[in-house]
Amino acid sequence: MPVVVRIPTPLRRITNGASEVVAKGKDVDELIVDLERQFPGLRERLVEESGELRRFINLYVNQEDVRFLSGRETQLKDGDQVSIVPAIAGGA
Amino acid sequence: MEPLSNVRGLTCQECKRSYPVSPVHVCEFCFGPLAVDYDYAAIRRVLTRARIASGPPSIWRYRDLLPIDGEPAVGGHVGFTPLVRARNLADELGVREVYLKNDSVCHPTWSFKDRVVAVATTKAIEFGFDTMACASTGNLANSVAAHAALARLHAYVFIPADLEAGKVLGTQVYAPVLVTVEGTYDEVNRLCSEIADRYHWAFANINLRAFYAEGSKTYGYEIAEQLGWRAPAHVVVPCAGGSLITKIWKALQELHALGLIERPATRMYAAQAEGCGPIVTMVKRDSDVLVPVKPRTIAKSLAIGNPADGYQAYRVVKDSGGAAEHATDEEIVEAMALLARTEGIFVETAGGVTLAATRKLIEQGRIPRDEPIVVCITGSGLKTAEVMESRLAQPVRIGPSLSAFDRALADLKSITRA
């Protein structure tokens, strides 16, 4: 399932400057495995040793936070767009 | 007073990696929030109560503890708002001593956001930006637009399309480029994160976040100074992204570390709306895992379902021995009316949330009735006027004659008696 992954600035050193990359996986977990295969070092930036997503990272599939979907088991299909976005401050 | 070179750099609050002073907002490694690292030893050598007291009646009296290099570029009148002893409200709540830290009269845009934006705008100019921007639930939008106008910077302001009329007009009037986004604040934020990656702008709450957030400390410094250089026993704080409560706490810790107040025994309490209360939920469940929510509340300035500083806000409540409470929409409006009726102060919905939560925490026995309580009021009621409209008494309309007034008064009295 090739999907487009949007890469935020802090991670672009690992993707050789690319702001979007294409990766495969039937779900988010598999996608992260494929990202690590293509861009070694990316996985540890996204997930803790336990495999859980890092506290300050938000992962969106087609603009929906995966925590409102099925988290790391969120299914992916051809043409989906995945965004990696750092948490952003606001309000009080 | 001579400005200090007081900042050493930025430090990740999660993994403790260090970064030089620059417009970056998250740790490149773990995405944790960056915080300003000060040279407290140097600050301690010069900072005294007298030095602060001889400064201007604004946030800049605490300039030694703010992350700017030169003179403040804007915000000459921001902050130093009243700490009001609320005796009528105390009677109503059945407690001995309540204070309102009243940023509904903060200059120039009637919310505490003027504090953070004055710092962010000064910092944006120091970094050489020509454009300010922000994602906002309303108050930040007002303040960024106003300060950018004063500093002659371009401004791009992004807000959810469903904000209150007062918040929209109170931004438009300063003529920024105002973009209303069809979505929640969390969606505006995600969009702005991608915009901030593409355009070289000073986003107050994104790439200037570490500096901007420091402005909130002045709210805490002022509370301590206005209480006669002592920390309050209890502080109830509205939470959206969760930054303010952490910065008030930090302010009290700093004042103590610098020898300006006794060790604070302050308990911090988080207040959120029931329709958007993920931080309060963490406290109630005693869990450090934040579960984001889809906001559904009239308190739009607090409607952030995925609070960036949620974890730190939770830690402050826990570490200080405080508690947290939700307020329903009905309780929010009732509390706004209560404050207007008892103290003559009209606050926005966020203030209603905070007072409603305070009342519940007192009734539950979590806040004792015989110790000083500070309720944080962060914005003006005119910004969210529509929530009050349906529950206010109608004016008495008459012709311009004394007899018309006499008749109207007789009618009023008969209604009151009945």
Image: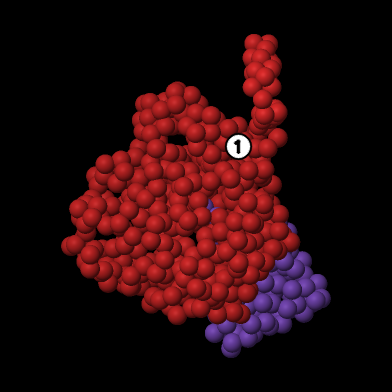
Chain colours: A purple, B red
Q: Nearer the viewer, residue B78 or B268?
A: B78
Which residue appears farthest toward the bottom when viewing the image?
A16
In the image, residue B198 sits, relative to residue B343, either above or below, namely below
In this figure, which residue is indicated by the disc labeled 1? Answer: B332
- Asked where in the image residue A31 lies, by quadrant, the reply is bottom right
| Image spot of residue B267 (x, y percent) | 39, 40
Residue sitting at 42 percent across and 43 percent down?
Answer: B101
Please say whether residue B62 is visible from this viewpoint. yes
Which residue appears farthest toward the right when viewing the image?
A78
- Asked where in the image residue A2 lies, by quadrant, the reply is bottom right
In the image, residue B73 sits, relative to residue B366, either above or below, namely below
Residue sitting at 58 percent across and 88 percent down?
Answer: A16
| Image spot of residue B36 (x, y percent) | 38, 66
Q: Amino acid at mark 1?
A: Ile
Residue sitting at 67 percent across and 66 percent down?
Answer: B179
Q: Nearer the viewer, residue B250 or B215?
A: B215
| Image spot of residue B379 (x, y percent) | 52, 47
Q: Nearer the viewer, residue B154 or A54?
A: B154
Residue sitting at 71 percent across and 54 percent down?
Answer: B162
Q: Quadrant of the C terminus of chain B?
A: top right
User: Pointer 1: residues within 10 angstroms few (<14), some, or many (20+)?
Assistant: many
Left or right: B229 with respect to B201? left
In the image, residue B349 sits, relative to residue B167, either above or below, namely above
Q: What chain does badge 1 belong to?
A: B
Provide the secondary structure element on which disc 1 rests. helix
In the image, residue B60 sits, relative to residue B191, either above or below, namely above
| Image spot of residue B144 (x, y percent) | 53, 64
Please say whether residue B244 is visible from this viewpoint. no
- Asked where in the image residue B44 lies, by quadrant, the reply is bottom left
